[in-house]
Image (cartoon, rainbow, N blue to C red):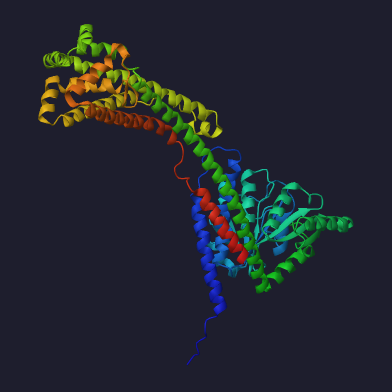
């Protein structure tokens, strides 16, 4: 009977921690993918680049490495234009596998060299999932380095050539990347993407370019991520080796890269195949072989680079959280401008409906037609009953004048709402165009006027308000006595009177502007009180005014929404979510 081995508690705990880390990272990746930075604020392009790079770092390196901690190390060979990267890669395997030459850029399609048995680790989408795979096996035939590989077209930039070669030590893959300072934007971006996916950097520079700014920016990034770096100082005249090497080592120490391995390749004449002398690449080859043979050492490099990448990602997320917070603040400011402008317009409309301004011109003329001549006003206080009979007879015989009052009120109120809505739109448009973010949201669209069909919507809303007002009068007059009274005056006549009362309020429900249009409001007030009583009139006027307020607000909110629709509604809370992930990943890196 075969004895059963007990599970390793330490290994089980490690697997559980890795699984939890993957869950945290996948959650962060989901929220990053859903992050939107829509407003054109200062520095937003850089923030969007940081966002894309954070997602790419998770996809290309952090998540694949956490899921496969025992996978081979990926050593990316990077450096400046003409530094000799491809020539060095050819030297590491002992024959031409990647194109080298004077025409720049030579490396446009990345080539990943691996031991044949390591192919399963790379033929899928485990790392660099955005690049398609082109698999190949090296044969014994060789061609000069100037003709090695292919001369790829533009589509080749999105593919990764996999070449199995027994000369590559098992456990380490070598990826020849484009120039970090290439004249091609696509090449530079791809180089940055590949370096971000590396467990190990082999950075190639030359004796006369080792202090260039572009490669040092990348090296400083490597130092901040605690990535293992091997520096190859290429084309060094033997006489200058000591001086140049010492100066480079001092620079590396000053920038936190004192642990970096430094390999010197002397200036040498290439053979007919475009190859360096065999001994030129031997120190680096030997270092890679020793590293491949040391499983614990490889695991240590992978974990250290992974931990540094997670720490750097946490810092990047903190910066993105700050940028998202700036977006929230800018969106809130734009939203407030639109809301304030239209709220002020609502207030101005309501002011115009209660200060007697509408009781002039056409409305006044139709109302006077309705109630009679000036003699009617003179006799008003002398005999309310006679006034009621006279007006009632007028109502019963000719209902048309009451409808004309409603129509005049509709027309006057519509003009006020149209004018104030246009003012609000002009104000919002002007404020937004004074702000780069608002200007970008508006683009070439002109929102400074009323929307299409807005006059018709106003008319419909006013008519609906008038209809509800009539229903209020019907409901209030349900008692037999009141019903007889409002029937004698006519529903339209009482409705017109109530509208006149609503439009003459200068101090809520307690004040009537008696002098407006020669006592216009008094007539309506007395009519309604004769039918319903004073308290009921106050209640009816309050309800009618509140309904009008609500409808005006609804109309202006719809106009305001044209602006607010330009603001993304999906960004709320993004800053807090990103800050939360930043804290979580920082703790994850600290535990590691």
Residue sitting farthest toward the front: 382
Residue sitting farthest toward the bottom: 1
Of residues 59 and 519, the one drawn nearer to the viewer in this rendering: 519
Number of numbered discs overlaid on the protein picture: 0
The residue that appears at 20% across and 19% down in the rendered structure is 527
Of residues 76 and 583, the one drawn nearer to the viewer in this rendering: 583
Q: Is residue 350 left or right of residue 144?
A: left
- Where is residue 102 shown, x and y percent of the image? 73, 47
Residue 131 in view in this figure: no
Q: Is residue 372 left or right of residue 451?
A: left
**In the rendered image, the vertical position of residue 358 relative to residue 106, given as above or below:** above
Residue 543 in view in this figure: yes
- Where is residue 420 shown, x and y percent of the image? 40, 23
Q: Quadrant of the C terminus?
A: bottom right
The quadrant where residue 10 appears: bottom right
- Where is residue 397 shown, x and y percent of the image? 11, 14
**In the rendered image, the vertical position of residue 170 relative to residue 263, given as above or below:** below
- Where is residue 97 shown, x and y percent of the image? 66, 59
The residue that appears at 69% across and 64% down in the rendered structure is 93
Q: Is residue 18 left or right of residue 559?
A: right
The residue that appears at 65% across and 73% down in the rendered structure is 295
The quadrant where residue 348 appears: top left
Of residues 74 and 436, the one drawn nearer to the viewer in this rendering: 436
**In the rendered image, the vertical position of residue 478 relative to residue 506, given as above or below:** below
**In the rendered image, the vertical position of residue 399 relative to residue 184, given as above or below:** above
The quadrant where residue 11 appears: bottom right
């Amino acid at each position: 009977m075969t004895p059963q081995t007990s599970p390793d508690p330490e290994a089980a705990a490690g697997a559980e921690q890795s699984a939890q880390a993957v869950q945290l990272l996948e959650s962060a990746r989901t929220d990053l993918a859903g992050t939107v930075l829509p407003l054109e604020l200062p520095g937003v392009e850089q923030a969007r680049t940081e966002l894309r790079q954070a997602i790419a770092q998770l996809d290309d390196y952090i998540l694949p490495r956490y899921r496969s901690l025992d996978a081979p190390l990926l050593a990316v060979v990077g450096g400046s234009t003409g530094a000799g990267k491809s020539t060095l890669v050819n030297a590491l395997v002992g024959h031409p596998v990647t194109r080298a030459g004077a025409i720049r850029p030579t490396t446009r399609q990345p080539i990943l060299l691996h031991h044949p048995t390591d192919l399963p680790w790379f033929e899928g989408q485990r790392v660099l999932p955005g690049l398609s795979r082109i698999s190949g096996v090296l044969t014994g035939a060789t061609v000069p380095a100037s003709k090695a590989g292919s001369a790829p077209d533009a589509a080749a930039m999105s593919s990764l050539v996999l070449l199995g070669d027994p000369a590559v030590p098992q456990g380490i893959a070598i990826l020849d990347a484009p120039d970090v300072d290439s004249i091609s934007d696509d090449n530079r971006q791809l180089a940055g993407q590949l370096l971000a996916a590396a467990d190990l950097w082999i950075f190639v520079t030359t004796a006369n370019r080792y202090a260039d700014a572009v490669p040092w920016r990348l090296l400083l990034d490597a130092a901040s991520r605690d990535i293992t770096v091997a520096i190859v100082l290429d084309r060094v005249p033997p006489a200058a080796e000591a001086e140049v090497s010492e100066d480079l080592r001092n620079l590396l120490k000053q920038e936190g890269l004192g642990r970096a391995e430094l390999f010197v390749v002397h200036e040498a004449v290439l053979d007919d195949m475009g190859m360096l002398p065999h001994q030129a690449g031997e120190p680096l080859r030997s270092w890679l072989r020793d590293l491949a043979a040391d499983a614990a050492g490889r695991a240590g490099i992978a974990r250290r680079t992974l931990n540094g990448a997670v720490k750097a990602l946490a810092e990047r997320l903190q910066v993105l959280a700050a940028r998202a917070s700036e977006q929230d603040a800018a969106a809130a400011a734009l939203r407030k401008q639109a809301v304030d402008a239209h709220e002020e317009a609502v207030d101005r409309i309501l002011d115009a409906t209660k200060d007697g301004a509408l009781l002039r011109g056409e409305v006044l003329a139709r109302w006077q037609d309705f109630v009679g001549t000036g003699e009617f006003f003179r006799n008003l206080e002398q005999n309310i009953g006679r006034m009621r009979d006279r007006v009632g007879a007028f109502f019963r015989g000719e209902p048309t004048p009451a409808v004309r009052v409603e129509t005049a009120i509709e027309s006057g109120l519509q003009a006020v709402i149209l004018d104030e809505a246009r003012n609000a739109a002009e104000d919002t448009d002007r404020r937004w165009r004074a702000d780069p973010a608002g200007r970008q949201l508006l683009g070439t669209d002109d929102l400074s006027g009323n929307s299409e069909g807005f006059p018709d919507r106003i008319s419909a809303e006013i008519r609906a308000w008038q209809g509800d007002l009539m229903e209020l009068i019907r409901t209030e007059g349900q008692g037999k006595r009141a019903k007889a009274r409002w029937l004698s005056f006519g529903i339209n006549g009482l409705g017109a009177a109530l509208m006149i009362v609503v439009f003459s309020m200068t101090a809520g429900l307690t004040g009537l502007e008696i002098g407006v249009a020669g006592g216009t409001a008094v007539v309506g007030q007395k009519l309604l009180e004769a039918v319903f009583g004073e308290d009921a009139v106050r209640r009816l006027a309050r309800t009618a005014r509140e309904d009008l307020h609500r409808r005006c607000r609804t109309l202006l909110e719809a106009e305001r929404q044209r602006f607010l629709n330009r603001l993304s509604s999906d960004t709320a809370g993004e800053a807090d979510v990103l800050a939360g992930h930043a804290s979580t990943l920082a703790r994850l890196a600290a535990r590691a």
